[in-house]
Amino acid sequence: MISVVLLGAGNVASHLFKAFFASEKIEVKQWYNRSLKTIDKYKAQVLVTDNLSTLVKADIYILAVSDDAIETLSKQLPFENRLVVHTSGSTSLYAVDMKQKRGVFYPLQTFSKAADLDFKNVPICIEALNKKDLPILKQLAEAIGSISHKVNSDQRQALHLAAVFVNNFTNQLYRMAHEITEMNGAEFDILKPLIKETAHKIESLSPYLAQTGPALRNDKKTIKRHLKQLENEQHKAVYELLTKSIKKTHGIR
Amino acid sequence: MISVVLLGAGNVASHLFKAFFASEKIEVKQWYNRSLKTIDKYKAQVLVTDNLSTLVKADIYILAVSDDAIETLSKQLPFENRLVVHTSGSTSLYAVDMKQKRGVFYPLQTFSKAADLDFKNVPICIEALNKKDLPILKQLAEAIGSISHKVNSDQRQALHLAAVFVNNFTNQLYRMAHEITEMNGAEFDILKPLIKETAHKIESLSPYLAQTGPALRNDKKTIKRHLKQLENEQHKAVYELLTKSIKKTHGIR
């Protein structure tokens, strides 16, 4: 049984709480938030508090708070030499106060408040200043069904940056496609199987090998027609830049 | 039973042949290609030919050839007033010779030679100059398990353009993520569950509502750090342009 104290009440914290609470291998000893309002409804399931001085003893303290709050909050912890991890993709391991045993427990996934998330589909990047602290972080990930990956800070920060490309930027391309179809009275929904297949394809092919389309074929006629079709200047700029990028990747002049 | 003659031997033609051949409701009467080499291996299953003057009678003639070849090939057909459709997303319905009953049968999906494709996941956009020809195109789509969508040329061309965004451009973002992770010794594979979830999320949420991340939060500190992390100028340009685009979509200055 791994005992944890959870700190914070945002998306990541809430999803972690649900997963921890559901696991037979984890005991959530306490849930802290600076305001009780958000977590008060869980008080039948877990000890809740807004007072750091009341924090109980646990194997792991999880700071699931905003990047900017990690350093300050970790400094205020009224104990030392315990395993304290943050859940941020981009924040340094050293943001956790040096009084503690420092680590990172970064779930690499997109969290929305509404949708339930199966942690089987959430890889967790773990990091610890002291190697001896890695096994318990690995066990914590496994206890909620996740696969853990031991990374260093550079790797974690590269993954966080790459995640912006495959998640936020990809989603913005979906948005543009939505705008393009709507402007022409076509249904965005017709594109959904293609969206799924595009994501599915790279399970077995590298993105390099999976590429197709007018830029790769250097089909100037289609590219020209597409650019003419696009009325929105921003859509046009994205079309031009990504076409150029595909050509460069594949050595097409 | 719908009888078809298939013309062309590229990716789309090959996938269509397999699906048509497997359907009990379709008879592939003949397969034409200008060179027999590619289709010769199918001669035990279907009549193959490289001679247009030998084309047999069928309900539908399907020109699954490159965009540029549609017009020329359709002019060479040695009959008139039969239903002739092309499979292109961007080519005009009028590229089919006016001697024929003209239509479009455009499967909106990414086709690779290697991977088998279930036509259940391939929406087919159908179009016909004469309304009376629509039902048989719809039946043809249904006979291979596809859902058909009646569109006009503007809608079809908008879908084709939007498909470049959600397929080719999205795939190029995956490629960039691959480069970013590799440059830092991180595993691209760790991103795959996120890639899947990003595609999955818009099943129930619009791309507008599904957006998250530093651009949406206007998190200047993270954006600045990400830009500093990016060494490749093209990655940087894409990061800047798509961040700007997300901000514009969501009214963030």
Image (cartoon, coloured by chain):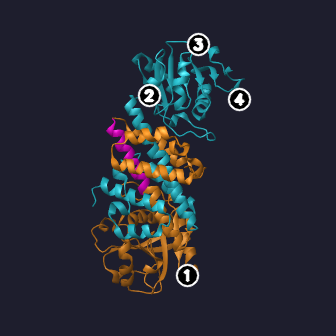
Chain colours: A cyan, B orange
Pointer 3 residue: A57
Q: Are marks 1 and 3 in contact (CB under 8 Å)?
A: no
Asked if badge 1 and badge 2 are on a common chain, one would say: no
Q: Residue at x 44, y 62 (%)?
A: A236
Q: Which mark is residue A92?
A: 2
Pointer 4 residue: A37
Label 3: few (<14), some (14–19) or many (≥20) C-alpha neighbours in 10 Å: some
Residue A50: x %, y % from top left: 66, 22
* Part of the protein shown in magenta: B168-184
Instruction: Chain letter for mark 1, please.
Output: B
Asked whether residue A54 is in view, the answer is yes
The label nearer to you, 1 versus 3, is 3
Residue B246: x %, y % from top left: 52, 51
**Magenta segment: does it hold B156?**
no
Place residue B65 in its image quadrant.
Answer: bottom left
Extreme-front residue of the structure: B253
Asked if badge 4 and badge 2 are on a common chain, one would say: yes
* Alpha carbon distance from label 3 to label 2: 25 Å
Q: Residue at x 61, y 41 (%)?
A: A115
Pointer 1 residue: B130
